[in-house]
Amino acid sequence: MAKCTSCKNRDAIFMRPYSGEKLCGRCFTKSIERKVQATISKYDMLKRDDTLAVAISGGKDSTSLLHILMKIEKDFPETTLCAVTVDEGIKGYRDEALRFAIKNCQKLGVEHKVISFKEMFGYRLDELVDMIRRKGERDLTPCAYCGVLRRRVLNSVARKVRANKLVTAHNLDDETQTILLNIMHGDVTRIARAKPVLSVAHPELIQRIKPFCEVPEREIALYAYLKKIEFQENPCPYAHTALRNDVRNMLNRIEQNHAGTKFTILRSMERIRPALEAMNEEEKLRSCKLCGEPTMGEVCRPCQMLQRLYIS
Ligand code: SF4
Ligand code: ZN
Ligand code: ZN
């Protein structure tokens, strides 16, 4: 077994294909924590007196991020932190994930708020999916509804707990998938907008930050395993319906043969983004005429989507 290239003492358990580093368990977990800290300072994500709402699903990414943030928080003693879980209402999946979210928050002594689609919109996602299928909405998948409505719920809850920042656990894989998906959907505005620190374009919109945006998903999985973090592992029953799933498989195949491709995509987008931002007029958000939440048009996307199912 090769020795760790960092401490040169313990046996390596992991080889980072894109850098060639061979790391022991301890140096590996430290490298992830250091990467998160470096990302936070690179993008100036945290201020000393921030109030953070951390979106935690009960999966490996958000649970690991919460554990790391609790360590980092010690350097930011005036920062307050609250975990937020959205229960979309996916039988046999989210209910199980919720148990892991609750358990981890209790273990870490973190205040935890849970809010469901049912409370916010009157329907569970499973019920919405039935309605989508009955109506034959072929262009909108369960994930399209789930993603848009979840973002809305997270923003509302973050506002309610008086957070000034909403922390999400989007990792390098999520970010590169989103870049390609936005290109596939021809959504130039969104490409420019999807930054590690989102610009605030409306007083009701809580700034979103993504401290895991430069950490690959498989490294987070290894971090969680080495730190013995308990999380939900089963995939969502609707995941296979999303285009994102095909993009994920494609990117993973490429990354396997050409290590570092995901980082290259992220860096390329960082270089292109200023030009895209200059092309797009500065976003002018207004208040949705139906619900009052921030929106680009007259009616926000969640209201539009719910109206398509004859509810609002
Ligand atoms: Fe929601 Fe789709 Fe994720 Fe399932 S896979 S939780 S439906 S976005
Ligand atoms: Zn080591
Ligand atoms: Zn609305």
Image (cartoon, helix red, strand yellow):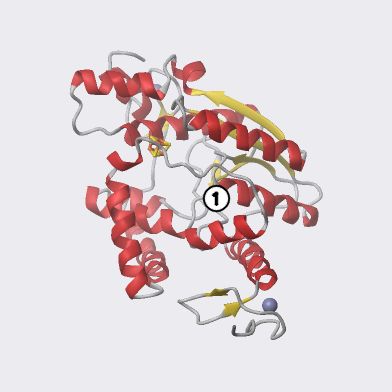
Q: Residues within 10 Å of mark 1 (few under 14, many from 20)?
A: many
User: Tag 1, which secondary structure?
Assistant: helix
Where residue 285 appears, x then y in whole percent?
41, 36
Residue at (62, 51) in percent of width and height: 64
Residue 286 quadrant: top left
Mark 1 Cβ and ligand 1 under 8 Å apart: no
Q: In this picture, is 146 found above or below 312?
A: below
Ligand 1 shown in quarter: top left
Q: Nearer the viewer, residue 140 or 202?
A: 140
The residue carrying mark 1 is 61
The N terminus, quarter of image = bottom right
Q: Nearer the viewer, residue 21 or 81?
A: 21
Residue 110 quadrant: top right
Residue 13 quadrant: bottom right
Residue at (68, 50) in percent of width and height: 67
Q: In this picture, is 15 found above or below 295?
A: below
Where residue 12 appears, x then y in whole percent?
61, 78
Q: How many marks?
A: 1
The C terminus, quarter of image = top left
Furthest residue toward front: 1
Q: In this picture, is 142 found above or below 39?
A: above
Where residue 138 appears, x then y in whole percent?
18, 31
Q: Is residue 130 visible?
A: yes
Q: In this picture, is 278 found above or below 118?
A: below
Q: Is residue 279 visible?
A: no
Where residue 278 appears, x then y in whole percent?
35, 58
Residue at (66, 33) in percent of width and height: 102
Say which amino acid is labelled 1. Answer: Asp
Residue at (54, 32) in percent of width and height: 96
Q: Nearer the viewer, residue 97 or 85?
A: 97
Q: Nearer the viewer, residue 130 or 77?
A: 130
